[in-house]
Image: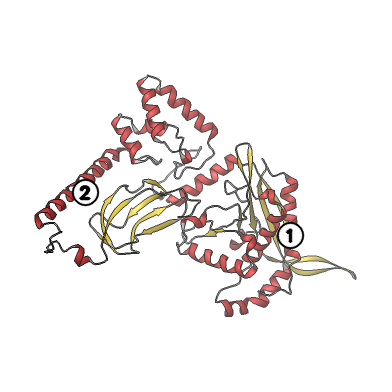
Amino acid sequence: MGESVAEATITSWLKEVGDSIEADEAVLEIATDKVDSEVPSEYDGVLVEKFFEVDDVVKVGETVAIIEVYGDDDDEDLDFESNTSDEKSNEEVEVEVEVAAAEVEQSLNQAKSTTETNASYSDSNRFYSPLVKTIANKENISLEELDSIKGTGLDERVTKDDILAYVQAKKEGTANAFSQKEVSYKEETKTALPQETSLPKSSAPVSINTEDEVIEMSRMGKLISSHMIASTQTSAHVQSFIEVDVTDIWNWRNKHKNEFLRREGEKLTFTPIFMEAVAKTIKDFPKINISVDGDKIVMKKHINLGMAAALPDGNLIVPVIRDADQLNLLGMAKKVNDLATRAREGKLKPDETQGGTYTVTNVGTFGSVMGTPIINQPQVGILALGAIRKMPSVIETPQGDFIGIRHKMFLSHSYDHRVVNGALGGQFIQRMKEYLENFDTNRGI
């Protein structure tokens, strides 16, 4: 996984203990906050032990399973009846095999016992490590108590120290105060997005008739919903809008799209042109390319553009174009097409949705003239591209003004008013407008 991915959730095991595995064959499936991926084996062998179960959260670098690897010559490795004097006898080998098998069986029994022990905590919407579940079960901590503990780990996850501190407080008779204090603090300071959370119910009662169908939200739907709620509670959202004449870009694309398709085997869309302009504008206004860490501002050295893409199931995903300012228009077009295609096919890698510093979403795809997008945390800005429409427009010429048909669109810029004031937010899309309206129609691709 990429450097920016710290952990992932196991969503399913594709192999069970005792199954044979070929090199490059998938062993398990994992999920980060948005992307599901398969984890392949690097060797031929047999799966002899699993250390984690489905829904467990595993940090990058941790061992998830043990595979007994075949040697270069399987026949030689399994030839226990060799007559050479320095090899072990059949009896010695059989004893060792029995001992090894007993150890594996003991480990599996322990893992099974732990899984059964932790089963009572499976109804929680929070993720707990096997160690935390084991400690909670040993100390007779109920699911309600466990859910009330404030975690100090990544995304406020409960760590070993957190559960032990709660156990100590419970023994001293201060558990209620400890829990209530931590829960209150969590509610006041919560800014990080947990990997999966229970969404608040509507404040107004929902009437459900017998003809109505109740559908459980998907895992990704829950994550997106939580992420949007967390963003609106974190950032002070302000929007600026500007209208842009993209007639020259429209005509230039029509002139080159067939040649591009013939030469590259791909479509030439408007998206890479807009992404190129966004990257240039961010270089002019680097204070848009930041994040907020408490009362500190983190200036990002790389311009990594998130590109919101619609999925077949109706959800959205945001693959990231890294170092977008270093790509020419051809490179940008190739990157945009590749990420969009693999996003729709579910073939993005976990790291390809991480590390974005600014996001662009195309609401015009569905005919919307403009939108007020929600900031993708921890970024401080997001740009919505409206639909391109033919519009009657006043055209200024040395001979006077006249009415003509032009291709126009709206840019909607949402930004975090905690650190981006109206002047910077407005200047940003004003410069974007200038780049688009002064597009070089003589350039090639």
Camera-near label (1 vs 2) is 2
Label 1 and label 2: CA atoms lie apart by 65 Å
User: Which residue occupies 27% across, 38% down?
Assistant: 117
User: Which residue occupies 60% across, 56% down?
Assistant: 304
Neighbour class for label 2 at 10 Å: few (<14), some, many (≥20)? some
The picture quadrant where one finds residue 444 is bottom right
The one nearer the camera, 45 or 133, is 45
In the picture shown, does residue 433 fall above or below 153?
below
The picture quadrant where one finds residue 23 is bottom left
Neighbour class for label 1 at 10 Å: few (<14), some, many (≥20)? many
Q: Could you tell me the amino acid type at mark 1?
A: Lys
In the picture shown, does residue 319 fall above or below 124?
below
Q: Which residue is mark 2?
A: 104
The residue sitting at the front extreme is 85
Image marks 1 and 2: residues in contact by CB distance under 8 Å: no
* Residue 307 percent across, percent down from the top left: 57, 58
* Placement of the C terminus among the 4 image quadrants: bottom right
Disc sitting over residue 146 in the figure: none
The one nearer the camera, 254 or 441, is 441
Q: Is residue 371 in sight in this rendering?
A: no
Tell me: 175 left or right of 381. left
Q: Is residue 410 in sight in this rendering?
A: yes
The one nearer the camera, 166 or 234, is 166
Q: Dot 1 lies on which element?
A: helix
Q: Which residue is mark 1?
A: 433
Q: Could you tell me the amino acid type at mark 2?
A: Val
* Residue 440 percent across, percent down from the top left: 74, 70
* Placement of the N terminus among the 4 image quadrants: bottom left
